[in-house]
Amino acid sequence: MIFQHVDLNNQRLIDSTRHDCESIKMYCGYLLAELTKFFALNHAQANFGVSFAATDNLVSAVSTPYGEARGRLTIQIVEGVISGRYVFEKSVVSDDGKDIWRPIWAIRIGRYGNVLLGDEGDIEIDVTNVGPHSNAISAPAKSLLYSIASTPIFKR
Protein backbone atom coordinates (compact mmCIF):
# COMPACT_ATOMS: atom_id res chain seq x y z
CA MET A 1 0.00 0.00 0.00
CA ILE A 2 1.34 3.40 -0.97
CA PHE A 3 0.45 6.42 1.13
CA GLN A 4 0.21 9.84 -0.49
CA HIS A 5 0.78 13.34 0.84
CA VAL A 6 -2.35 15.01 2.24
CA ASP A 7 -2.77 18.32 0.41
CA LEU A 8 -3.29 21.63 2.19
CA ASN A 9 -7.02 21.89 1.38
CA ASN A 10 -7.65 18.52 3.00
CA GLN A 11 -5.49 19.44 5.98
CA ARG A 12 -7.68 22.51 6.53
CA LEU A 13 -10.74 20.29 6.91
CA ILE A 14 -9.52 19.29 10.36
CA ASP A 15 -8.67 22.78 11.64
CA SER A 16 -11.74 22.87 13.90
CA THR A 17 -11.83 19.17 14.77
CA ARG A 18 -12.48 19.59 18.49
CA HIS A 19 -15.34 22.07 18.04
CA ASP A 20 -16.89 20.11 15.16
CA CYS A 21 -16.78 16.81 17.04
CA GLU A 22 -18.23 18.35 20.21
CA SER A 23 -21.02 19.93 18.18
CA ILE A 24 -21.89 16.64 16.46
CA LYS A 25 -21.91 14.84 19.80
CA MET A 26 -24.19 17.51 21.29
CA TYR A 27 -26.74 17.16 18.49
CA CYS A 28 -26.50 13.38 18.69
CA GLY A 29 -27.29 13.65 22.41
CA TYR A 30 -30.39 15.73 21.61
CA LEU A 31 -31.53 13.12 19.10
CA LEU A 32 -31.06 10.22 21.51
CA ALA A 33 -32.85 12.09 24.31
CA GLU A 34 -35.83 12.74 22.05
CA LEU A 35 -35.96 9.13 20.86
CA THR A 36 -35.87 7.98 24.49
CA LYS A 37 -38.78 10.31 25.33
CA PHE A 38 -40.76 9.24 22.27
CA PHE A 39 -40.54 5.51 22.95
CA ALA A 40 -41.46 6.10 26.63
CA LEU A 41 -44.76 7.83 25.76
CA ASN A 42 -47.88 5.86 26.72
CA HIS A 43 -49.20 5.71 23.16
CA ALA A 44 -45.78 4.66 21.81
CA GLN A 45 -45.55 1.90 24.41
CA ALA A 46 -49.07 0.73 23.54
CA ASN A 47 -48.39 0.79 19.79
CA PHE A 48 -44.77 -0.32 19.52
CA GLY A 49 -43.60 -1.91 22.80
CA VAL A 50 -40.08 -0.58 22.32
CA SER A 51 -37.54 0.14 25.04
CA PHE A 52 -34.91 2.72 24.02
CA ALA A 53 -32.07 3.74 26.33
CA ALA A 54 -28.94 5.78 25.67
CA THR A 55 -25.80 6.22 27.75
CA ASP A 56 -23.76 9.36 28.29
CA ASN A 57 -21.22 8.09 25.75
CA LEU A 58 -23.97 8.09 23.06
CA VAL A 59 -24.42 4.33 22.83
CA SER A 60 -28.03 3.16 22.64
CA ALA A 61 -29.76 -0.13 23.41
CA VAL A 62 -33.07 -0.92 21.73
CA SER A 63 -35.38 -3.77 22.69
CA THR A 64 -38.34 -4.48 20.38
CA PRO A 65 -40.80 -7.28 19.67
CA TYR A 66 -38.67 -7.91 16.55
CA GLY A 67 -35.37 -8.32 18.36
CA GLU A 68 -32.54 -6.37 19.95
CA ALA A 69 -30.56 -3.53 18.42
CA ARG A 70 -27.89 -1.06 19.42
CA GLY A 71 -26.55 2.20 18.09
CA ARG A 72 -23.32 4.16 18.21
CA LEU A 73 -21.83 7.31 16.77
CA THR A 74 -18.87 7.50 14.44
CA ILE A 75 -17.37 10.80 13.31
CA GLN A 76 -15.41 11.07 10.08
CA ILE A 77 -14.81 13.18 7.02
CA VAL A 78 -17.31 12.35 4.28
CA GLU A 79 -17.15 14.14 0.93
CA GLY A 80 -15.02 16.90 2.40
CA VAL A 81 -17.16 17.54 5.49
CA ILE A 82 -16.76 16.41 9.10
CA SER A 83 -19.98 14.64 10.02
CA GLY A 84 -21.42 12.05 12.34
CA ARG A 85 -23.05 8.81 11.37
CA TYR A 86 -25.19 7.15 14.00
CA VAL A 87 -25.36 3.50 12.99
CA PHE A 88 -27.94 1.07 14.34
CA GLU A 89 -27.13 -2.64 14.34
CA LYS A 90 -29.44 -5.59 14.96
CA SER A 91 -28.52 -8.78 16.75
CA VAL A 92 -28.90 -11.63 14.26
CA VAL A 93 -27.81 -15.24 14.05
CA SER A 94 -25.06 -15.97 11.52
CA ASP A 95 -25.06 -18.99 9.20
CA ASP A 96 -22.88 -20.85 11.68
CA GLY A 97 -25.25 -20.11 14.58
CA LYS A 98 -23.29 -17.31 16.23
CA ASP A 99 -24.78 -14.06 17.45
CA ILE A 100 -23.51 -11.14 15.39
CA TRP A 101 -24.45 -7.48 14.95
CA ARG A 102 -25.58 -6.43 11.48
CA PRO A 103 -25.85 -2.74 10.46
CA ILE A 104 -29.46 -1.97 9.54
CA TRP A 105 -29.92 1.81 9.43
CA ALA A 106 -28.11 5.11 9.96
CA ILE A 107 -28.74 8.76 10.71
CA ARG A 108 -26.31 11.46 9.58
CA ILE A 109 -25.53 14.35 11.91
CA GLY A 110 -23.84 17.50 10.67
CA ARG A 111 -21.69 19.82 12.72
CA TYR A 112 -24.31 22.58 12.42
CA GLY A 113 -27.12 20.37 13.72
CA ASN A 114 -28.56 19.17 10.45
CA VAL A 115 -29.83 15.64 11.09
CA LEU A 116 -30.63 13.57 8.01
CA LEU A 117 -32.49 10.26 7.93
CA GLY A 118 -30.54 7.48 6.23
CA ASP A 119 -27.19 7.54 4.47
CA GLU A 120 -28.47 9.08 1.27
CA GLY A 121 -31.71 10.60 2.47
CA ASP A 122 -32.57 14.24 2.14
CA ILE A 123 -35.18 14.34 4.92
CA GLU A 124 -33.83 16.70 7.55
CA ILE A 125 -35.20 16.87 11.09
CA ASP A 126 -34.80 19.39 13.88
CA VAL A 127 -33.73 17.75 17.13
CA THR A 128 -33.43 20.89 19.24
CA ASN A 129 -36.99 22.27 19.33
CA VAL A 130 -39.37 19.34 19.27
CA GLY A 131 -42.41 18.26 21.22
CA PRO A 132 -43.16 14.68 22.22
CA HIS A 133 -45.65 14.22 19.36
CA SER A 134 -43.46 15.84 16.71
CA ASN A 135 -43.05 14.20 13.31
CA ALA A 136 -39.39 15.17 13.60
CA ILE A 137 -38.92 12.37 16.13
CA SER A 138 -41.64 9.92 15.09
CA ALA A 139 -40.08 9.63 11.61
CA PRO A 140 -36.68 8.36 12.80
CA ALA A 141 -38.32 6.28 15.55
CA LYS A 142 -40.63 4.50 13.12
CA SER A 143 -37.86 4.18 10.51
CA LEU A 144 -35.64 2.51 13.10
CA LEU A 145 -38.38 0.11 14.19
CA TYR A 146 -39.19 -0.75 10.56
CA SER A 147 -35.50 -1.42 9.86
CA ILE A 148 -35.32 -3.76 12.84
CA ALA A 149 -38.56 -5.52 11.87
CA SER A 150 -37.61 -5.98 8.22
CA THR A 151 -34.15 -7.42 8.87
CA PRO A 152 -34.28 -11.22 8.47
CA ILE A 153 -32.69 -13.91 10.60
CA PHE A 154 -33.24 -12.06 13.81
CA LYS A 155 -32.50 -13.35 17.25
CA ARG A 156 -35.43 -13.87 19.62
Image: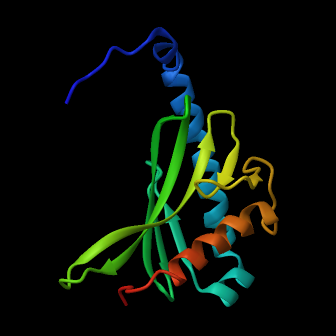
Relative depth, front residue between 137 and 7: 7
Is 78 on the left or on the right of 143, as rendered? left
Q: Position of residue 101 (x, y in %)?
A: 33, 69
Q: Is residue 18 placed above or below 26 in the rendered structure?
A: above
Q: Position of residue 102 (x, y in %)?
A: 37, 69
Q: Residue at x 48, y 18 (%)?
A: 10
Q: Residue at x 43, y 66 (%)?
A: 70
Q: Is residue 99 placed above or below 85 in the rendered structure?
A: below
Q: Quadrant of the N terminus?
A: top left
Q: Position of residue 29 (x, y in %)?
A: 58, 48
Q: Residue at x 62, y 53 (%)?
A: 120
Q: Is residue 73 placed above or below 42 in the rendered structure?
A: above
Residue furthest to the front in view is 2
Q: Position of residue 25 (x, y in %)?
A: 54, 40
Query: How is the model colour-coded?
Result: rainbow
Q: Is residue 140 placed above or below 8 in the rendered structure?
A: below
Relative depth, front residue between 8 and 148: 8
Q: Quadrant of the C terminus?
A: bottom left
Residue furthest to the top in view is 8
Tally of marks? 0
Relative depth, front residue between 44 and 140: 140
